[in-house]
Amino acid sequence: MQNNVMMQINTDFLIIGSGVAGLSFALKVAKFGSVALVTKKEIMDSNTSHAQGGIASVFDKVDSFDLHIRDTLASGDGLCNRDVVEMVVKNGPDRIRELVDLGVHFNVKDKERTDHKSRDYDIDFDLGREGGHSQKRIVHAHDMTGMELESVLVAHVKNQDRIALFENHIAIDLITISTRMKRGQIITTHEDYCCGAYVLDRQTDQVKTFCAKITLLATGGAGKVYLYTSNPDIATGDGIAMGYRAGATVANLEFVQFHPTCLYHPDAKNFLISEAVRGEGAILIDSSGNAFMEKYDPQKDLACRDVVARAIDVELKKSGDDSVFLDISHKNGNFIKERFPNLYEKSLTFGFDMTKEPIPVVPAAHYLCGGIATGMFGRTDLHRLYAVGETACTGLHGANRLASNSLVEALVYSHTAAIQAVKDLGALDFSSTPDPPPWDEVGTTDSDEVIMVSHNWDEIRRFMWNYVGIVRSDKRLARAQRRIESIQKEIHEYYWNFRVSADLIELRNIAIVAELIIKCASHRKESRGLHYNIEYPNRDDSRWQKDTIIRRPFVG
């Protein structure tokens, strides 16, 4: 590779992803070492920026940690790690106070005190309620909580001299080094550890080698594996795919959360109608104006997301309609405009006035509860590699994420992971780490068959929606497995013959994640949480109250 020295970046911490998890981690570790923050588009382009509802945490006097823990465990349908749930719930308030101290403005009841530091008084947040929660505990910034968090964190990151920002850089693969530990002449251990990543500069088409002592994956979720999703275009499962290829264990990828209420309109790409709307009294109705959720759950419209999404799916299959409707028009119009200013204005652009009429909605892929398996401090089982946020499977969500638990998980785990990573930085011996080999593209040419990328991208997303969606069967999963095996062969041949591009990298990643979802779903012979198989409609604790674990076979 020409000018390879100019394309090697050495850093203490490499962070891949610029959502709340990656940004929070960066700010905490920058005090202890150099940081390279890689993000595949602009820094503000993340799932976090699209988060509307808020952060679940206990602040109300009638609420308690025990209640939040109980709600989380109930939502997780028997698969949550209770130790993790307790840690996240009990640490949530402190992490939110940190955000207030950084300048994040949440809705509070006493509007005169919004600029005060959190430690100067007990914050009286204007708390919301969402599905699955027994109390009001959603801390929010109107209906644009994620954008508020992202804006403040980005501003702090850009003011940090020790954080080098690499926008429009897409990671290709992690770099791992195999080491052999010897006692005399006998090889006793073989282990891999991560020492950085190969990254494509999208503006120059050059591949850069990032050498790092600690690497963090915080690339978000994988909603683009499905045809219909609330996620932005960046959500292609990059971190999960890279971690798996490098040898990290993944878990529970069958549990894909479909958000019940995305706006149904041909031009409303990725537009989510927050669960907070139902928390404020909105009702789901069919095309005849009949409320239907009472048939499916005692909590009606505030049931957990898996229940609501399946209920809508059943109603649509029975009626043949294109959508159901979300109606909050019975509430005061001024209240709606003040509580949901972004949703109100955005809906108007599509011709719907939510203060006067129901809004057409359908479910869409929203959140991946599985991911790279981590311990209590964000460590993966690949040495020197951490994962946080939606990329990780921490044990918090189990079989179904409780609404607004994702941001609090990201905040708590970026905090604990930063503490542990700083300890590792000081304790590990990095003196013998060899320089990784330069990126090798000898024998490759520029692609002359870009149609392969676009065709396979479209086919994966369609058969995942049809065969591995809200309701599954063994027959559908088998069809999906056959299709992904065929597509994987094409992608593998294409990848090694042509120079990498951003589109090819993302296609390769969604194919890996799709295959992992199919394998996990095929393995679980029951219905639990977000995984519903019509051939095994009941939960079976005697056989399946356990995580689904996949490890890549070692090739040496």
Image: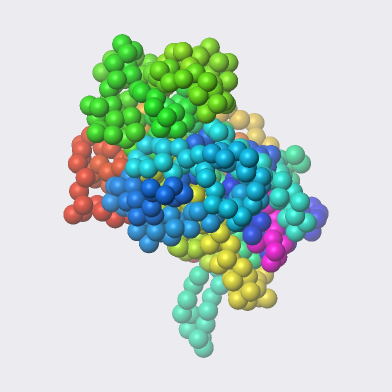
Q: Quadrant of residue 119?
A: bottom right
**Residue name at image x 39 percent, y 25 percent:** 282
Residue at horizontal 50%, vertical 60%? 378
Residue 149 vs residue 139: left or right? right
For residue 389, say whether it is visible. no
User: Magenta span has 196?
Assistant: no
Query: What residue span does the magenta drawing correspond to?
Result: 29-39
315 and 429: which is toward the camera: 315
Nearest to the observer: residue 256 or residue 463: 256
Q: Is residue 535 above or below residue 336?
A: below
Task: Specify the farthest residue to the bottom.
Answer: 184
User: As displayed, is residue 191 above or below residue 389?
Assistant: below
x then y, percent, for residue 227: 46, 28
Please provide percent x and percent y for residue 54: 50, 40
Vertical relation: 292 (above or below) 478: above
Report whether 306 appears left or right of 117: left
* Structure colour scheme: rainbow
Q: Position of residue 350 (x, y in %)?
A: 54, 15
Marker count (numbered)? 0
Dividing the picture into quadrants, the one containing residue 234 is: top right
Residue 332 appears in the picture as rendered: yes
Q: Write the residue at 32% across / 16% down.
A: 286
On the image, the x and y values in percent for residue 213 come to 64, 66
**Toward the viewer: 43 or 525?**
43
User: Magenta includes 37?
Assistant: yes
